[in-house]
Image: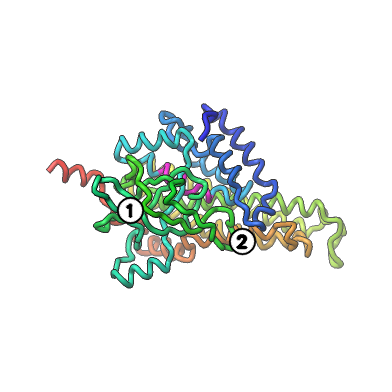
Amino acid sequence: MTTAQPATLAEALPRIRAVLAEFPKGVGERDLAFEHPDALIRALAEAGFGRLRVPVEFGGFGVGLPALFELLAEAGQADSNIPQIWRGHFTTTEVLRAETDPVVREHWLRVAGQGAVFGNAQSEPSAIVAEAVAAQGESTTGWGVTTTRVRTDENGDRFVSGTKFYSTGSRFADYIRAAVASEDGVRSFVVIPARHPGVTHVDDWDGVGQRQTGSGTTLFADVPVEPHGDIGRYRESLRGLDSFVQIVHLANLAGIARSLVAETTDIVRARTRTSLHALTQNAAADPEVLGVIGLLEARRLTAETLLRHAAERLEAAHASGEESDYTAAYLDTSAAQIAVIEAVLDAATRAFDAGGSSAVRNSVHLDRHWRNARTLASHNPVVYKPRVIGDFVVNGVAPVPGYYTNRPSAADAEERTAQ
């Protein structure tokens, strides 16, 4: 962290955008070399990027969801690794904004307001999960199997041990929000230090896209739980997260759509010839080539419009607090997911039609957009979303909230304490 954090949003935004402007320089080369943008991610943190959703009273800028997701789309255009790296951080700040324990809420929001970055360690390697299911017969409902455990020593101190995968952003972070199971099997989130000697970040993410997100394995060996480290214990702190985490991907996909328009336009303007059957040898005047750019622009507008709609629906759900509004936000987010993925993957394929055979060269880096969009489309699998929407439309069956199904309510806990 740095002592030179910007004091206001007006001061932060030019600094954030100046850092974002550095990411496109060499982004294609980083992709081919599997080189992580460590220094640039730290520069974003120092510019105040992680403080965007932290309330002003705790040192943040308190921006609304539409503004946050617009900035994430800008980041996705600069380098689509950025929003995914920061997804765990912004998810954590969402949990903290709604944290029911006032001491925990203030403590961690002040830490985030000082510029600290949070990483994610929620999912676990499928082989380890399968082994746990076979050995213990654990249920796979709700949060699924969590083999990462918290143990309490004789002094009452708690330590986390286990293995995580898809631990996106953790290698760049100061703290990690880890999904754990207690000794009696209760699942929860705890905050642990990301740079403790017991934390090992393994650079083994081998996806076809999103190669610089640090989404590989993270090993925990007796890593201490931070003071006030229990967060999101009750369902009230987790409402809307199913929509939020998906809208981060929508913002990223909108950013990719912007990149496709900009980079393909540059390719067309730089072309010195077209082909035998073209109506003109000037690519910038070729009707078919111009039609490709027009389709890419239409796909961009689709992505941006649906992103804005989803963000506004989730913002409205937070304002009302009604469960029916959270359901509506999730359904609209799911519909947006379907349409945005189709639009951006189509754009990422059609872009090559504007550039000819030279566009497939590694040095052009155009292929990274399809690979990155395809990778993002594989998270929170879109294949299930049409059925979820259809079941609600036809049968009135609301989708199950993945983050807080079977989670206790703070109100119920208070009632039990009072008794």
Q: What element carries label 1?
A: loop
Q: Position of residue 140 (x, y in %)?
A: 33, 65
Q: Where is residue 379 in the image (x, y as percent from the top left)?
A: 49, 60
Q: Is residue 180 left or right of residue 413?
A: right
Q: Quadrant of residue 349?
A: bottom right
Residue 414's place in the image compared with 243, above or below, is above
Q: Whole-Å distance between the Cαs marked 2 and 1?
A: 32 Å
Identify residue for label 1. 404
**Between 212 and 419, the one nearer to me in the picture:** 212
Q: Residues within 10 Å of mark 2 (few under 14, many from 20)?
A: some
Q: Residue 371 carries which label?
A: 2
Q: In this view, does 359 lie to the left or right of 132?
A: right
**Between 265 and 129, the one nearer to me in the picture:** 129
Image point 41% across, 43% down: which residue?
94
Residue 408's place in the image compared with 144, above or below, is above
Image point 54% across, 60% down: which residue?
205
Image point 42% across, 51% down: which residue?
198
Q: Magenta residues: mostly which secondary structure?
A: helix
Which quadrant of the figure contains the C terminus? top left
**Between 360 and 145, the one nearer to me in the picture:** 145
> Of marks 2 and 1, which one's residue comes earlier in the chain?
2
> Is any atom of residue 396 visible in this view?
no
What is the magenta range?
A: 84-94
Q: Position of residue 147 (x, y in %)?
A: 35, 61
